[in-house]
Image: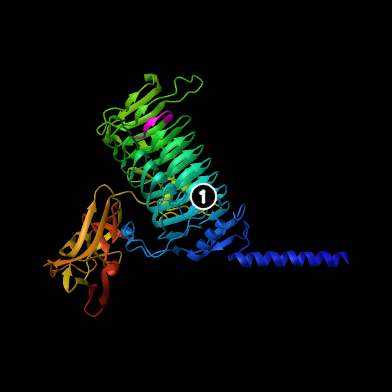
């Protein structure tokens, strides 16, 4: 009788468990071995709804199994004035926390749109308490709110954020960051931000505000601007540390603007940090920090600084000398390019022996210098392990996280036998341009074409003669092409040549210039001194066809 009762009870519990899984709508059981599966935008919305209904998913696990497109991003840069069709409510708020673990599985969420200027805790995740968010890419995101605003998470409380990529635009009133608005007693590790950040107070390329937190192995690429405390990595940091960080966007603020941190409060350290890009403020501006009460070690800055109190490293350096038991305010083993800035520190109350600073001529800066003095724990890409602490490579003379190039670098397997390939430095030969008998035409007018890697390629500059707008941004190293329907002025006609088809013309070189068609990145090359793209990729602007008999490629514009 007892056995029958036990079996009945077990059956009832099993059925209840199955019913619960069916009711929440996710495949999987939510365990680490069998996580809940997120397959669509509808699943993300369902997760948000369940958290708002009081389900925190504490100690439960989620896995993103598919790339998700929430909105078409063709008109992404007009979203500020013309909102797209779909929006998703942030996952969690101040009353209903998300406490689970979310693994993005290397997948990408594209076209995230959230805009509510009256709302706090805004991002794909609104308010996360504990748990972990990792291995997630978010592209073409537009996120706008009031306070604690980030592309990945608005407010991260005791949360680990790791292996993240964010791209887009984020703005708010206070505590706004490319990855997280606020991180408190947490960790941000291995993160790349290509996000334009704007905030009235505390704006950061990675985090707006960091308290009792660790931020390491991070890169911020775009502009950060605001009124108070703008930083390339973090706007305002307190009792926190930034280590192994690189920022290259222009940083602006009315009061405190820093290449790494706007405001470094007490008990803070910035170590192995490198910033390049202009830093501008009406009051205090520093290549590393605008106002610092903390320690700066192994830092380097290259750029121009503008402000009332301006320094290549620190605008105002103010160690807590009134507290003798606190030994902060040092600047050690740090450098700046002397052709860009005159002084290391704008204003200081520290002793001169607290400084170990060297102005370095810009022409002496090279990869070896950066490796030795900035990222001195650098190990080659070939030595990366499954969970590397050191994930820096070099793109020309500038450091970069290897996770920035997922199409080029691959993580080693668990045995560590496979090695990620190394992206060549700028100007390195990657192929050859060869002659071709195929001719290319746009609206019936011929355009000069060559053969690169077996495919027809053209120079972007030549598109100007076919009614295209070709704009080069020197600061961002980007070329953007859009079609304006202008007059075709090209008179090019290929000449007969004695050269055998397939003959060598020139080398193809690696380049740091990126090409975009209407804001969408496309593959590009440096050939004969100009940026080239494949003719077939012009299909964004119309119909591309190939006539085998005539040996002709045609683009008919929309």
Q: In this orientation, which residue lies closer to the viewer: 110 or 545?
A: 110
- Percent from the top left, x then y, of residue 402? 42, 49
Residue under circle 1? Answer: 127
Is 309 one of the magenta-colored residues? no
Asked if residue 393 can be seen in this view, the reply is no
Prevailing secondary structure class for the magenta stretch in the rendered image = strand
Marks counted in the figure total 1
Q: Residue at x 50, y 62 (%)?
A: 45
Looking at this view, name the residue that lies furthest to the front: 118
- Percent from the top left, x then y, of residue 315? 33, 30
Is 293 one of the magenta-colored residues? yes
Compared with residue 73, is residue 162 higher up or lower down, i.e. above or below? above
- Percent from the top left, x then y, of residue 394? 37, 45
Colouring style: rainbow
Q: Residue at x 29, y 52 (%)?
A: 511
Looking at this view, name the residue that lies furthest to the right: 1
Asked if residue 327 can be seen in this view, the reply is yes
Magenta span covers which residues? 286-296
**Which element carries disc 1, helix, strand or loop?**
strand
Crowd tier of the residue under label 1, counting other residues whose Cα lies within 10 Å: few below 14, some 14–19, many 20 or above: many
- State the quadrant of the C terminus: bottom left
- State the quadrant of the N terminus: bottom right
């Amino acid at each position: 009788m007892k056995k029958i009762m036990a079996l009945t009870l077990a059956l009832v519990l099993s059925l209840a468990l199955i019913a619960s899984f069916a009711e929440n709508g996710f495949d999987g059981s939510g365990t680490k071995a069998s996580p809940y599966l997120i397959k669509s935008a509808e699943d993300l919305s369902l997760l948000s709804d369940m958290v708002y209904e009081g389900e925190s998913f504490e100690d439960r696990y989620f896995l993103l199994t598919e790339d998700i497109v929430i909105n078409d991003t063709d008109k992404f840069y007009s979203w500020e004035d013309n909102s797209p069709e779909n929006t998703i409510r942030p996952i969690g708020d101040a009353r209903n926390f998300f406490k689970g673990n979310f693994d993005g599985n290397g997948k990408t969420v594209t076209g995230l749109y959230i805009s509510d200027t009256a709302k706090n805790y805004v991002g794909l995740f609104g308010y996360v308490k504990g748990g972990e968010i990792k291995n997630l890419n978010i592209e073409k995101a537009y996120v706008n709110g009031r306070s604690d605003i980030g592309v990945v998470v608005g407010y991260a409380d005791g949360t680990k954020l790791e292996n993240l990529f964010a791209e887009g635009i984020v703005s708010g009133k206070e505590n706004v960051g490319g990855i997280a608005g606020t991180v408190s007693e947490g960790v941000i590790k291995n993160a790349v931000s290509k996000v334009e950040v704007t905030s009235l107070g505390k704006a950061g390329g990675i985090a707006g505000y960091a308290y009792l937190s660790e931020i390491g192995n991070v890169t911020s690429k775009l502009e950060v601007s605001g009124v108070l405390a703008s930083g390339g990595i973090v706007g305002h940091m307190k009792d926190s540390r930034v280590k192994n960080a690189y920022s290259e966007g222009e940083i602006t603020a009315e009061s405190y603007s820093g290449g790494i941190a706007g405001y470094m409060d007490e008990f803070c350290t910035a170590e192995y940090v490198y910033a390049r890009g202009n830093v501008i403020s009406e009051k205090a501006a520093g290549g590393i920090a605008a106002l610092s009460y903390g320690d700066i070690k192994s830092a380097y800055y290259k750029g121009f600084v503008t402000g009332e109190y301006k320094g290549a490293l620190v605008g105002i350096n103010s160690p807590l000398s009134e507290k003798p038991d606190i030994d902060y305010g040092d600047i050690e083993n740090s450098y700046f390019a002397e052709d860009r800035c005159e002084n290391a520190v704008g204003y200081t109350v520290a002793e001169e022996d607290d400084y170990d600073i060297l102005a370095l001529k810009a022409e002496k800066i090279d990869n070896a210098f950066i490796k030795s003095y900035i990222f001195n724990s650098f190990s080659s890409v070939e030595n990366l392990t499954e969970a590397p602490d050191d994930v820096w490579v070099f793109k020309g003379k500038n450091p970069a996280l290897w996770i920035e190039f997922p199409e080029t670098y691959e993580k080693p397997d668990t045995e560590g036998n496979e090695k990620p390939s190394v992206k060549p430095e700028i100007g390195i030969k990657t192929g050859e341009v060869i002659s071709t008998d195929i001719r290319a035409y746009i609206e019936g007018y011929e355009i000069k074409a060559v053969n690169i890697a077996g495919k027809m390629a053209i120079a972007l500059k030549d598109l100007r003669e076919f009614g295209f707008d070709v704009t080069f941004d020197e600061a961002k190293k980007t070329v953007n092409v859009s079609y304006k329907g202008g007059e075709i002025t090209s008179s090019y006609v290929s000449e007969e040549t004695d050269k055998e088809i397939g003959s060598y013309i020139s080398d193809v070189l690696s380049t740091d210039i990126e090409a975009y068609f209407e804001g969408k990145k496309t593959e590009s090359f440096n050939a004969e001194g100009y940026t080239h793209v494949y003719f077939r990729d012009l299909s964004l602007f119309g119909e591309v066809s190939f006539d085998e008999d005539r040996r002709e490629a045609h683009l008919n514009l929309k």
